[in-house]
Amino acid sequence: MKRTAWGVFLGSLALLFFLQGNRLIFMNDEGILLEPAQRVLSGQRPYVDFFAYMSPGSYWLQAAVFKIFGLSIWSGRTLVLFDFALQCSLIFWLTARFSTRRAGLTAAGLFFCFQIADPSWITAQHRWDSSTLLLAATVAALQNRWLLAGALAACGALCTPSMALVIGVWLIWLVFDGQQQRLIVPFAAGLAGISVAAVGFMALQGILPAFLGQMLWLQRNYSAVNVMPYGALIGGYASLFEGAGGAEWVVRLLIVACIAIPAWLPPAAGIYWTAKWRLSPETRFLLLTMLALLLTVFPRADVMHLAFIAALPYVLGAIAWSRSAPRHVGPALAAGLCALSAMFLVNFLNQWRRSRVDLPSPVGVLRADPMQAAQLDRLFQLVRPGSSLYVYPYMPTFYFLTQARNPTRFAYLAPGMMRAQEETAALTQLEASPPAWILYSPLSRQEFLRVFPNATSLSERFERLESWVTANYQPEANSPVSVSSYVLLHRKELQVSKAQP
């Protein structure tokens, strides 16, 4: 079984590197990790020298990868591709351990095909790091390696603070389960070892008070804009059925059901296993862990965030299916699911095939969409590495792709979550050191509420900063550069100086 698990890991990793390693995807969350990680690599301190959105674990991990492999799109994707491949392998191992090898391979294959359906999901993200570390900790715990489980779980919480909820559930389970109380000591030792080392390192860097302040800021500001109902989709489910009727409506329903697997599979698996009163300690532990992981995604419990913690639902669902499905019906339905997953994989491959332009960039050759390649090439010619660039309001991926210098301490400025204090800080730095270039995308009220539907009482604009931008910058006169809805602007005085004899 170990050889097969290694095969799943290496095969998934190789395929992902080929398909996703240098594919250009404009995803805000990826830049939120890569731009700060590059700052850490250059010696800057999170929370003190620049605004760091989350706890420092993923910044440290990504900076270490950059240190080892250099700055490139490939190294920027290394962690997430490793995370995803490892999750596929652990899904196989866990499922096969409690059911059959065939069920394990089926679960891993379905997870792979459905999860990569949207290429933007498999991009650098702190939640991939934390969920993978917690999944590895779960496997370690099932093997009675509780010292290792504690260390891995602590590392997961360093990447995403809400993962501490899982640690709390595990501690409660160990305390109240008489047969497991002896395991509290090694688990606590693993937790303490990583926690003390991390706190000590932050204290030596002089960032510990600022880190604690950022965690309080996150607690106050995140929920104000990021509340989404359980299982929601950005844009809503209704938009996926517009114009459909008859057989097409049924086909779309099947597709939507596959997209929403991260939302409906956890309650389905939870209901099934909760109904079985006599659970083995291992199965009970997996069920409690899955429920605890579900808590970590709130208040933004949309399908995308549920996808980050979908591995255990796949495991529990596959075990339940292999044990309880009728002999003749089970294989037929499993074959149907495999066929649907193959359709998702083929769609992914077709999208990848259409992104066929190899575009040189400061971070290596990018596999880009032909529709964007010309504008991107002009962007790279105008905004050279080391030049000053400000991107507003989102998409800090541009900093990484161009290797330009951000004159502010903010990788991005998110309306709704960030307030006047952050706007003032960014504007002060922009006025003190005006960048040569700005990539600007005016955010409409409609688009803001599409992504943040519960932020109706919040403004989507930073009016003072936007007024400064429009007063001092303008697009290229002859042929404006526009990439992914962002227009490249230059300082007006620079244009005037060029026009003078």
Image: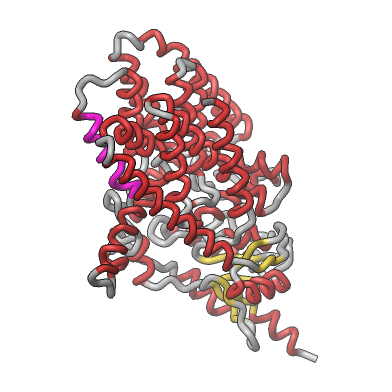
In this view, the residue in front, 301 or 136, is: 136
State whether residue 359 is above or below residue 233: below
Residue at image position (32%, 45%) is 332
Q: Position of residue 55 (x, y in %)?
A: 50, 39
Q: Position of residue 209 (x, y in %)?
A: 51, 36
In this view, the residue in front, 416 or 299, is: 299
In the image, residue 169 lies in the stretch drawn in magenta: no
Task: Name the magenta segment's main secondary structure.
Answer: helix
When asked about the image quadrant of residue 106, the answer is top left
Quadrant containing the C terminus in the rendered view: bottom right
Q: Is residue 440 left or right of residue 257?
A: right
Q: Is residue 33 left or right of residue 450?
A: right
State whether residue 198 is above or below residue 127: above
State whether residue 418 is above or below residue 358: above
Q: Position of residue 139 (x, y in %)?
A: 46, 25
Is there any visible trace of residue 431 in the rendered image? Answer: no
Residue extent of the magenta highlight: 261-274
Q: Is residue 291 left or right of residue 310?
A: left
| Residue most extreme to the front | 328
| Residue most extreme to the right | 501
Q: Position of residue 230 (x, y in %)?
A: 28, 49
Query: Colour scheme of this structure image?
Result: secondary structure
Residue at image position (61%, 78%) is 481
Is there any visible trace of residue 334 in the rendered image? Answer: yes
Q: Is residue 448 left or right of residue 359?
A: left
In the image, residue 264 lies in the stretch drawn in magenta: yes
In this view, the residue in front, 101 or 472, is: 101
